Image: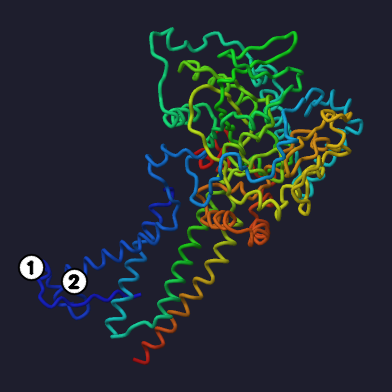
């Protein structure tokens, strides 16, 4: 387009200095001050319009004073009242569980409880699903196995590291001294200040960015097992300030003063996770356990150094319960997985801490996620063995574990150890089918979209949180736009430098 | 903030374009009708959305989604802008 300049009627010295411009005045002219200012105004409007569609960032004060579980929670994520997690709970049924005899992912004990246990059949189904998802994929190759096995050897398969995932774990040679030992006062901060401090400290060790805080009350105590699967009796003790255990009888004593529960995770390696189920797809899960085992010691020492006490609770409770209770995310079709509006199913190994450090509580949320799961079911389509309830199976009170019924619950006069928790109306994964490190479901979730990417995700999430009317359409668009796994065959990861994030996690997922 | 400079540049281009367009209309002593403004602004907004989606999806490492979105949002934007342009330019020839 030709730019048309109007001739200035008065002229000025600057213009007069340039004869050529004066001679060309029939064709060109200069801006008046008024027009210049008008132009600036329009430029400002243009810039405003352009930046309106770029990601919105909150200022630092707003960010640090936030008491929601995620530091950059969007306006469309609504807060629920404490105790309302968006699914029905029958408190007459949901009680502290006795999980003795329960063994998830332990083939030895598994076979005792589930004679049909068949790892070979699982592996075959797993490979078939890989082929179904990526027909042109020719792997796995040696390097795929090398990656998988090395991650496993230092992660989930490493007793030296993994031992620390248990409550007491390793004994540190140089524990952080308590304040009085170094002549310092016990840390005193408001709950809000303490929550900010926790966020800051956790960020250094690979926990977060979603960090929820729940109160351990009469109801939420029921998420904590009465007996864990190691046979330890978990006792809330009014008379102690520090946790301890006994071996005979096997007990873990948790001080009742530890009424603040911190719920967080280690972030998954997203580009690997999107390539599950495959040989390399489960790496993110296996290594995450070791990362959390390491982080756990740091948290214990940090809180000890402040002059407070903490108990780590990896196997003390149902994994995502405190996530829901504290607003980290919502219940989802995948059952055992918490879905966050910001990170979807990308959050890996959960880390739960019970502490007496006063913290600001974070409320449960409603981002429309559980509702979305009702009409989605993409995770179930990605499951090699049909362990995730498929689309069409709505939230229910049943076990969904092959051959098990809550009617036969050993805790209610039956004969079987239940592999799922009764007492809530939701979805449950079939623990007898979901046999090994797979991650097929988690990598498939539409909520795994990277934050601060396309504006489309914000529009979809905002709409989803407001009305379920378009949920089916959004599910279809997820598939049509190839936002799932279509273009993510496992081999492609090795050829995609932009997917090699440090620690495997896209920086935009980290805060 | 990754694309601040890009969108700043696009904003500047947009501002210069709009300013020139208004100047062009004034020079011919013409005005645009309300529906021409509506179509034009809608087209520009859609075009901006298409560009944002393209770069956003590329940064998420979903190139197919990026190109698909560019077509789905960008084509209607171009069509709207082309229609607006034609309506105005044909009228300008009559003036």
Q: Is residue A230 left or right of residue A66?
A: right
Chain on which label 2 sits: A
Examine the image and state in which quarter residue A312 appears. top right
Kind of element beneath mark 2: loop
Q: Is residue A413 left or right of residue A238?
A: right
Q: Residue furthest front?
A: A92
Q: Are marks 1 and 2 in contact (CB under 8 Å)?
A: no
* Residue identified by numbered label 2: A30
Q: Residue furthest bottom?
A: B94
Characterize the local packing of mark 2: few (<14), some (14-19) or many (20 or more) Cα atoms within 10 angstroms.
Answer: some
- State whether residue A59 is above or below residue B27: above
Tell me the CA gap for discs 1 and 2.
Answer: 12 Å
Q: Position of residue A80 (x, y in %)?
A: 56, 45
Examine the image and state in which quarter residue A144 appears. top right
Examine the image and state in which quarter residue A206 appears. top right
Q: Residue at x 27, y 64 (%)?
A: A41
Residues at marks 1 and 2, common chain?
Answer: yes
- State whether residue A415 is above or below residue A444: above
Of residues A415 and A487, which is closer to you in this image? A415
Q: Which mark is residue A25?
A: none
* Residue identified by numbered label 1: A13
């Amino acid at each position: 387009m030709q730019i048309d300049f109007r001739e200035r009627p008065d002229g000025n010295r600057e213009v007069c200095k340039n004869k050529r411009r004066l001679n060309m005045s029939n064709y060109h002219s200069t801006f008046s001050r008024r027009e210049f200012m008008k132009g600036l105004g329009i430029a400002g409007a243009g810039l405003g319009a352009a930046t309106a569609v770029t990601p919105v960032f909150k200022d630092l004060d707003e960010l640090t004073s936030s008491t929601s579980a995620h530091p950059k929670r969007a306006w469309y994520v609504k807060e629920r009242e404490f105790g309302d997690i968006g699914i029905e709970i029958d408190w007459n049924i949901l009680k502290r569980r006795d999980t003795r005899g329960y063994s998830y992912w332990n083939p030895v004990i598994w076979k005792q409880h589930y004679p049909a246990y068949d790892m070979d059949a699982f592996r075959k189904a797993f490979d078939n699903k890989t082929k179904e998802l990526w027909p042109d994929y020719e792997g796995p190759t040696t390097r795929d196995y090398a990656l998988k096995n090395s991650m496993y050897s230092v992660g989930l398969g490493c007793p030296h590291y993994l031992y620390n995932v248990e409550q007491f774990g390793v004994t540190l040679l140089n524990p952080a001294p308590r304040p009085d030992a170094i002549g310092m006062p016990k840390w005193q901060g408001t709950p809000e200040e303490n929550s900010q401090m926790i966020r800051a400290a956790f960020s250094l060790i690979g926990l977060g960015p979603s960090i929820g805080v729940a109160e351990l009350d009469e109801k939420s105590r029921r998420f904590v097992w009465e007996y864990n699967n190691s046979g330890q009796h978990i006792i809330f003790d009014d008379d102690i300030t520090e946790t301890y255990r006994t071996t005979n009888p096997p007990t873990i004593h948790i001080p009742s003063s530890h009424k603040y529960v911190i719920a967080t995770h280690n972030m998954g390696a997203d580009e690997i996770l999107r390539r599950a189920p495959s040989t390399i797809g489960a790496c993110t899960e296996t290594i995450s356990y070791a990362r959390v085992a390491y982080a756990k010691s740091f948290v214990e020492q940090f809180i000890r150094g402040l002059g407070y006490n903490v108990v780590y609770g990896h196997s003390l409770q149902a994994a995502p319960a405190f996530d829901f209770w504290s607003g980290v995310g919502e219940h989802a079709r995948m059952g055992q997985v918490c879905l966050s509006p910001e990170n979807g199913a990308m959050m890996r190994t959960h880390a739960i801490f019970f502490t007496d450090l006063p913290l600001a509580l974070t409320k449960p949320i409603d981002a429309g996620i559980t509702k979305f799961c009702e009409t989605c079911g993409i995770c179930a389509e990605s499951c090699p063995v049909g362990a995730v309830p498929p689309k069409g199976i709505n939230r229910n009170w049943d076990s969904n574990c092959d051959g098990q019924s809550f009617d036969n619950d050993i805790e209610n006069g039956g004969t079987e150890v239940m592999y799922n928790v009764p007492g809530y109306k939701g979805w449950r994964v079939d623990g007898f089918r979901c046999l090994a490190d797979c991650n097929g479901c988690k990598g498939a979730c539409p909520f795994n979209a990277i934050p601060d990417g396309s504006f489309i995700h914000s529009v979809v999430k905002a709409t989803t949180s407001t009305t379920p009317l378009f949920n089916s359409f959004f599910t279809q668009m997820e598939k049509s736009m190839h936002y799932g796994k279509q273009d993510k065959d496992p081999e492609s990861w090795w050829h995609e430098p932009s997917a090699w994030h440090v620690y495997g996690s896209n920086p935009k997922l980290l805060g | 903030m990754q694309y601040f400079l890009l969108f700043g540049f696009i904003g500047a281009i947009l501002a210069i374009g709009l300013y020139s367009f208004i100047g062009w209309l004034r020079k011919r002593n013409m005005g645009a009708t309300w529906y021409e403004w509506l179509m034009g602004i809608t087209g520009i907004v859609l075009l901006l959305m298409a560009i944002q989606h393209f770069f956003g999806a590329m940064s998420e490492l979903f190139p197919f989604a990026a190109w698909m979105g560019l077509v789905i949002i960008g084509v209607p934007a171009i069509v709207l802008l082309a229609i607006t342009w034609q309506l105005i330019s044909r009228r300008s020839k009559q003036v």
